Image (tube, helix red, strand yellow):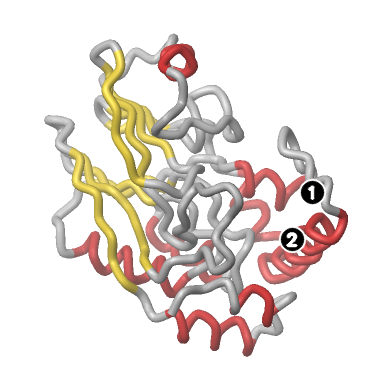
Amino acid sequence: MRVALLSDMHGNAVAFRAALADVERHDVDLIVSLGDVAQGGPQPKECVDLLRELGCPCVFGNSDDFLLTLDFGAEPVEDEERRQRLLDTAAWSREQLGAEGLEFLRGFQPTVQAGEVLCCHATPVSNEDVILPDTDRGDLERALANVETAAVAAGHVHLQWLRRVNGKLWFCVGSVGLVYEQRQPPDPVPFLPWSEHAIVSDELEVSFRRIPFDVEQLIDAARKSDFPDLDRWAAMWQR
């Protein structure tokens, strides 16, 4: 079985369609969404509609949770201006989705098992914890402590990477709709014009995919939809 793993669309249906077109060329048996589908971009409803058409299993991400609850969870935002921007975007996204779209998000699962791969958003027990390539080995071992499958696939950190720990494989599939580097301080123009996902086989052969998409098409969609804070958001995309 070949499984396509897609995560972190973040309301970018232009990139989502580019990823799906690539998936169609690779003869996969199953698609799994690893969460963070709608919040943060100008096409939340289009992303939800695409998932509904696919009928694929979906993992519940932290931004999916935020859209439903408006609770910042374990990552409190101290910058009041940024906090208000996030709330304004969430309110706009909730309006776009409507009751039916929000109910669809509520149906997402904490994890999905696809053969020998346990699919999660951040870790098998959390959709907020951050595991990066340089995370301490002990922290990664704890994240894998009760995992019985041979591999874990995650999203959340918007990076593609793979690591083996105690015979188990941990890999992150990247972001379909919002690719950026995990740098501190962040790049002034952080968002890259790529759509990322991964394809994994029964033999645990992982293929990382990176597909270009049309940023100007995305920005045009944002302009037509009256997406909040458009100018600031559009200036964050590399051309």
Q: Secondary structure at mark 1?
A: loop
Quadrant of the drawing holding the N terminus: top left
Q: Nearer the viewer, residue 200 or 85?
A: 85
Residue 239 rendering spot, x and y as whole percentages? 43, 80
Query: In the picture, residue 65 is in which quadrant?
Result: top right
The residue drawn where x is 38% and y is 51% is: 6
Mark 1 vs mark 2: which is more N-terminal? 1
State how far apart marks 1 and 2 are (Cα).
8 Å
Query: In the picture, residue 86 is in which quadrant?
Result: bottom right
Identity, as a three-letter code, of the amino acid under mark 1? Leu
Q: Nearer the viewer, residue 223 or 148?
A: 223
Q: Secondary structure at mark 2?
A: helix
The residue drawn where x is 75% and y is 69% is: 92
Residue 26 rendering spot, x and y as whole percentages? 15, 57
Report the number of discs.
2
The residue drawn where x is 36% and y is 66% is: 194
- On screen, residue 138 versus residue 205, left or right, reads right
Pointer 1 local density, CA inside 10 Å: few below 14, some 14–19, many at least 20? some
Looking at the image, is 176 positioned above or below residue 227? above
Q: Are marks 1 and 2 in contact (CB under 8 Å)?
A: yes
- On screen, residue 74 versus residue 235, left or right, reads right
- On screen, residue 74 versus residue 58, left or right, reads right
Looking at the image, is 141 positioned above or below residue 11? above
Looking at the image, is 113 positioned above or below residue 157? above
Residue 205 rendering spot, x and y as whole percentages? 15, 36
The residue drawn where x is 54% and y is 33% is: 130
Identity, as a three-letter code, of the amino acid under mark 2? Ala
Q: Which residue is mark 2?
A: 90
Looking at the image, is 10 positioned above or below residue 168? below
Q: Which residue is mark 1?
A: 70
Residue 143 rendering spot, x and y as whole percentages? 47, 18
